[in-house]
Image: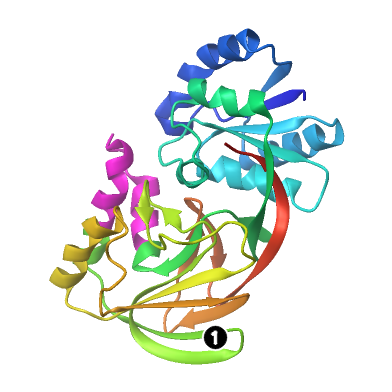
Amino acid sequence: MDLCLIVNPTAGAGRAARLLPDVEAELRALGQRFRVERTTSMEHARELARAAAAAGEVAVAMGGDGLTGAVAGELRGCAGVLGLLPGGRGNDFARKLGVDHDPVKACAVLAAATERRIDLAEVGERTYLGILSAGLDSDANAIANHTRLKLGTGVYAYAALRALKRWAPANWTVSVDGDTRTFAGYSVAVANSGVYGSGMYLVPDASLDDGMLDVVLCEDTPKRTYLANVPKVFKGTHVDAPALQFLRGRSVSFYADRPFTAYADGDPIAELPATVRILPGTLRVLAP
């Protein structure tokens, strides 16, 4: 299968651009036919994905989760196939799929060309791969995306600490497949893959091909208790925390008593109120 490498040269503070020559050398050694396109914007990445699909090429996203999500959104429900070379900071979708963090080693997955179908989540006209969340996560994502500190994957923990310092609980209304409930607390998260924030397994058992969304409600609890649970999320050992509710459904609508921007795959994706629905088996992806 011919490959179109859609590369975000700024991903991972230039990590993708630095590793691209090694990736090209490895693909040649594996006998792969490919061409390289460098993105100038997310919209440009979407255009490149559409062109690759039309040409019968595998659209290979080499960047972070934002780029991967943008490319995936253009391939849903069509003949296009997604490939993945982790080149960003978080690479949570690659982590969920079991693709090696090193994009040079990940070339072997493209050469094997083993395909599977997975679900996408849709909010409005946008789709995402990982977790859509709003509330404290909104504030933390905004801080992470605007900081100039070179913290690598630690940027999300840093951002969460800063956001928590000035946080006040919000009042939420959430409807899952028509079942509505209210609560006061930190956040609402609607998960497809279950992983975000550079390795935070918010829903450890989430499946990419079960046709369901996993919903996490984080109720009000003392900040010190919330903070004590954060390290557990990286191991997936937080799930018994009393402040957490785990729900499942195919359609989720929610809003709060003050404005929030919902983030997914590391980028702003919707303003609340928002409705998320699952798109079962709509994406073809090369995976281990």
**Count of numbered tags:** 1
In the foreground, 257 or 197: 197
- In percent of width and height, residue 38 lies at 63, 25
Amino acid carrying label 1: it is Ser
Magenta stretch holds residue 148 = yes
One can see residue 66 in this view: yes
Q: How is the image coloured?
A: rainbow
- In percent of width and height, residue 104 lies at 50, 20
- In percent of width and height, residue 22 lies at 51, 12
In the foreground, 239 or 225: 239
- Answer above or below: position of 224 versus 29: below
- Answer above or below: position of 244 versus 78: below
Residue at 52% x, 80% y is 254
Q: Is residue 190 left or right of residue 230?
A: right
Residue at 74% x, 32% y is 58
One can see residue 125 in this view: no
Q: Quadrant of residue 81?
A: top right
- In percent of width and height, residue 31 lies at 69, 11
Per the image, the residue denoted by label 1 is 175
Residue at 24% x, 50% y is 158
- Label 1 crowd bin: few (<14), some (14–19), many (20+), radius 10 Å: some
Q: Quadrant of the N terminus?
A: top right
Q: Quadrant of residue 42?
A: top right
The part of the chain drawn in magenta is: 139-160
Magenta stretch holds residue 24 = no
Q: Is residue 1 left or right of residue 67?
A: right
- Answer above or below: position of 259 versus 19: below
Residue at 86% x, 36% y is 54
SS assignment for the magenta stretch, majority = helix
Q: Quadrant of the C terminus?
A: top right
